[in-house]
Image (cartoon, helix red, strand yellow):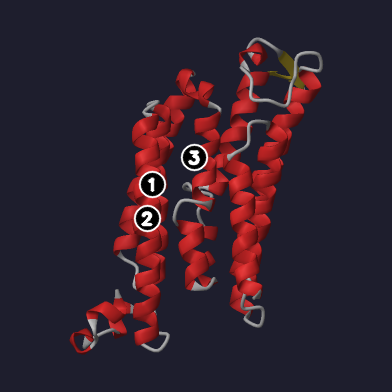
Amino acid sequence: PRFMSYLSLFTFFMLMLVTADNYVQMFLGWEGVGLASYLLINFWTTRIGTAKSAFKAFFFNKLSDVSLILTFLILIIFLPNTFTFNFTNIYVLDGLRFYFFGINLNLINLFIAGLLICSFCKSAQFGFHVWLPDSMEAPVPASALIHSATLVSAGIFLLGRIDFLTSIEWVSTFILLWCSFTALYGGLIAAYQTDLKKILAYSTISHCGFLFLLVIYNNFFALVLYLHLHGWFKSYSFMAAGNIISKYLGYQDYRRMGGSIGFNTLDIL
């Protein structure tokens, strides 16, 4: 019952996030997804490794939340008369500047930097990806939920929802370089993993890099299609991996797996 309640809580906050039409509802869903993921990863509360992994994931989620709060504060403080909580055009920030310890900063660049850090933390891009492989301590159904089309896709959804970013040249170039390297890095590291669930985790990191590339090219039809396909095959892959692990009595190292010809294929897949 506790596990099912955590899954239901995660689903509730994820639906709140993706159906938001204003900053307040989106932030509540964003916070709730981070909390629910912590509870799911730390489901086996008696394991020390599980507690460490859950805290690492919670730390990166809080870093993402702080970045999102700072971007909202920029809007509230510097646009007190024109700011609304609905998604609006933020081009009015362009040209507004303020001095921070003698440094002249453009507000729209500061706003975009906060959004990029926020989305990169949540979607596990290079440099912010270390929490995702460790989140494999969660039960397999929770891993399937976190890695499919939910938690790690939240950052991609955020940039796609605030789509004016892609019209700024330096943002598109930065995302192109950073996320292309992430896609390459995730694929290479996955090829050298021996843990069955970590292979899928690094595969998720690689796919998220490709999804960010679709955002900057404004191909939202392909983006939504890719999100659906990734969600389906990743969730099924994790459920199949969980069945295989149970057949091998809890071993996740594929180097210790053999003799599968004796198993019923339908039982495994």
Closer to the camera in the image, 123 or 235: 235
On screen, residue 116 versus residue 73, left or right, reads left
Find numbered disc 2 in the image and state the secondary structure of the residue it sits on. Answer: helix
Q: Amino acid at mark 3?
A: Ile
Name the foreground residue: 21 vs 185. 21
Nearest the eye: 19 or 123: 19
Q: Residue at x 64, y 76 (%)?
A: 1
Does the image show residue 182? Answer: no
Circle nearer the N terminus (2, 3): 3
Q: Position of residue 116 (x, y in %)?
A: 56, 35
Q: Which structural element holds mark 3?
A: helix
Q: How many marks?
A: 3
Expressed as whole percent of the image width and height from the top left, the position of residue 258 reads 24, 86
The residue indicated by pointer 3 is: 156
Disc 1 to disc 3, how far (Cα)?
13 Å
- Residue type at numbered disc 2: Trp
The image shows residue 114 at horizontal and vertical percentages of: 63, 34
Q: Is residue 216 visible?
A: yes
Q: Are marks 2 and 3 in contact (CB under 8 Å)?
A: no
For the point 54% across and 50% down, the residue is 128
Q: Nearer the viewer, mark 2 or mark 3?
A: 2
* Tag 1: amino acid: His
Alpha carbons under labels 2 and 1: distance apart? 6 Å
Q: List the residue tagged with mark 2.
A: 232
CA neighbours of label 3 inside 10 A, class few (<14), some (14 to 19), many (20+): many
Contact between marks 2 and 1 (CB within 8 A): the answer is yes
| The disc label shown at residue 228, or none | 1
